[in-house]
Image (cartoon, helix red, strand yellow):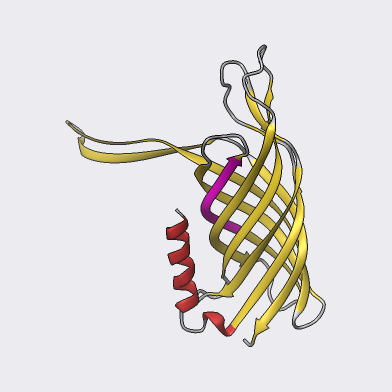
Amino acid sequence: MKKILFFLALSIFTYKGALAQIQVNVYGGYVPASKTAYNYSGYRLRIDDSGNFGVALDFALPLKGIEAEVSYMHFSSTLRQDGGIVDNVETQPIIVEYYQLGLLKPLMEGSSFIPYGLFTLGASRFAPEKATKEYWRFAMNAGLGVKYFFTDKMGIRLQARLLMPLYFSGAGFGCSIGTGGSGCGTGVGFGSEILQGDFTGGVVLKLGQK
């Protein structure tokens, strides 16, 4: 997953004109507590609320009015058991990271005040301190935010996101033939193991020229 994200990000950097102007976003914020969607023998796993920080790079794309964004987010929290009669999970520190690549769509142009929508895909990493391994999941994020530029080169950014690590639940393919005709179809299923979110604010610096 990390290699895929690297090559996708590299393709953006090598696009002619992509480096004409880059917006560097450095931010920090708050991640509310979250729980796994499913029970494990009568209990769920809980990740406590915590502060987070991250960085994002935005570049213009050939598609008018759409920007590409590459981002990284990190937070450290506590993993604990929620519910259940017997304690099966030892409370321990956990590190969570999101590596994302996607699209940012400004909802207003020609102003220093720019509301936007955001959708990204990538990977998430969950690393409990005392676990024998770390857990990587495909993940997608969706968010809304606003940028406000008080000079040509500097501004602030406020944002709220939904963070969704996903698991693959199966795929199928089938065909049928009947009096009404024939047809084939495919299906792929995903589900979310845990829903997270964050509320962040930070600074935006424009580098380069349009």
Residue shown at the point (64%, 65%) measured from the top left: 56
The spot of residue 139 in percent (x, y) is: 53, 47
Look at the picture and state if 131 lies above or below 82: below
Residue sitting nearer the eye, 149 or 108:
149
Residue extending furthest right?
150
Residue shown at the point (69%, 49%) measured from the top left: 75
In the image, taking residue 74 as reference, residue 193 lies left or right, namely: left
- Res 62 visible: no
Residue 31 sits in quarter: top right
- Res 204 visible: yes
Magenta-colored stretch includes residue 87: no
The spot of residue 1 in percent (x, y) is: 45, 53
In the image, taking residue 134 as reference, residue 186 lies left or right, namely: left
Residue sitting nearer the eye, 158 or 75:
75
In the image, taking residue 96 as reference, residue 121 lies left or right, namely: left
Residue 174 sits in quarter: top left
Residue extending furthest bottom?
209
The spot of residue 208 in percent (x, y) is: 64, 85
Residue sitting nearer the eye, 204 or 43:
43
Residue extending furthest top?
85
Write down the region rendered in magenta: 118-127
Residue sitting nearer the eye, 152 or 73:
73
The spot of residue 125 in percent (x, y) is: 56, 46
Residue shown at the point (78%, 60%) measured from the top left: 201
**How many numbered marks appear?**
0
Look at the picture and state if 158 lies above or below 166: below
Look at the picture and state if 44 lies above or below 182: above
Residue shown at the point (47%, 64%) measured from the top left: 6
Quadrant for the C terminus in the image:
bottom right
In the image, taking residue 55 as reference, residue 28 lies left or right, namely: right
